[in-house]
Image (spheres, rainbow, N blue to C red):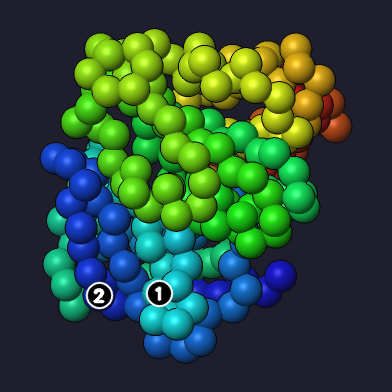
Amino acid sequence: MKKLVQDFEVLHKEELNKGTFVIDIKASKPLPDIKPGQFVNVLVENATNTFLRRPLSIHFVDYEKNIIKLYIKKLGEGTTKLGDLKLGDRLNIVFPLGNQYSIPKNSKTLLIGGGCGVAPLLYLAKHLKEAGNEVTTILGVRSAYDAVELDSYKEYGRIFVTTEDGSIGEKGYPTQHSVLNEKFDYTFTCGPELMMKAVAAYAKSKDIPCEVSLENTMACGFGACLCCVTDTKRGNICTCTEGPVFNINELKW
């Protein structure tokens, strides 16, 4: 798929909770076909210590409005600068990068996300529903304060929450939720590596396919800088070009 470099305009900004934002960026040209799981590399301007582009999962795409939604959590200088963007600001991005989650048909699918790693799952849920799948999503967060966008997920299927403090949903971690007692056909996940490894272990125990999206640092997006190399059963490969989505059977987990 052809990679593009374009300036986007910040059209809308929504603060989900303190430090977490969704921004809508509008393209000047019609958007190409963008798949769930793909990402963009964003140029962070006016940052003294952020020299490399920042990889961000594509949170959602609205072709009618010609916008991409990006989910941003302020974690360092780069993401703080992005979170401080104002309406009308310009953002230079390289896109669409990477591969995509598989989209089965007419199956019972389970999505598990944690932290800011939930970013690609909403767009994935949309595609899965459109393909005739039954979609169940579990979000693992620290507390009710962090349980955001639940109504958006409800548009595409069931949504469950686990919290570490038990303030909403079931207390514990996503891989401990009682809905896992049901039978699913596919599992997809994104989030902290420890959580994804636990999801992978669950999927293997149930003998169901599982795909994970790795969050390695991906500076160039073209496999040139080798920042994102990951060790797989195929050898060392670039996450930005061969991933970020991998079947767990490819990984040495």
17 sits to left or right of 154: left
Q: Quadrant of residue 9?
A: bottom left
Name of the residue lying farthest toward the bottom: 29
Residue 140 versus residue 13 in the image, above or below: above
Q: Amino acid at mark 1?
A: Ile
- Report helix, strand or loop for mark 1: strand
Q: Going by the image, does 37 lie left or right of 60?
A: right
- Nearer to the camera, 50 or 190: 190
Q: Is residue 105 above or below residue 178?
A: below
**Where is residue 248 drawn, in percent x and y?**
74, 28
| Residue pictured at 48% horizontal, 31% vertical | 138
Residue 155 rendering spot, x and y as whole percentages: 45, 54
User: Which residue in the structure is indicated by mark 1?
Assistant: 67
- Locate the N terminus by quadrant: bottom right
Between 162 and 28, the residue placed more toward the observer is: 162
Residue corresponding to mark 2: 11
- Residue at horizontal 72%, vertical 35%? 186
Instruction: Identify the residue at the far right of this view.
Output: 234
Find the distance from the CA under tag 2 to the CA under tag 1. Answer: 8 Å
Residue 151 on image: x %, y %: 34, 49
Which amino acid, by three-letter code, is at mark 2? Leu
User: Residue 210 occupies which quadrant of the picture?
Assistant: top right
Quarter occupied by the C terminus: top right
Q: Residue at x 15, y 56 (%)?
A: 84
Q: Is mark 2 in CB contact (under 8 Å) with mark 1?
A: yes
Residue 225 appears at what percent x and percent y?
59, 48
In percent of the image, x 70 and y 56: which residue is there? 132
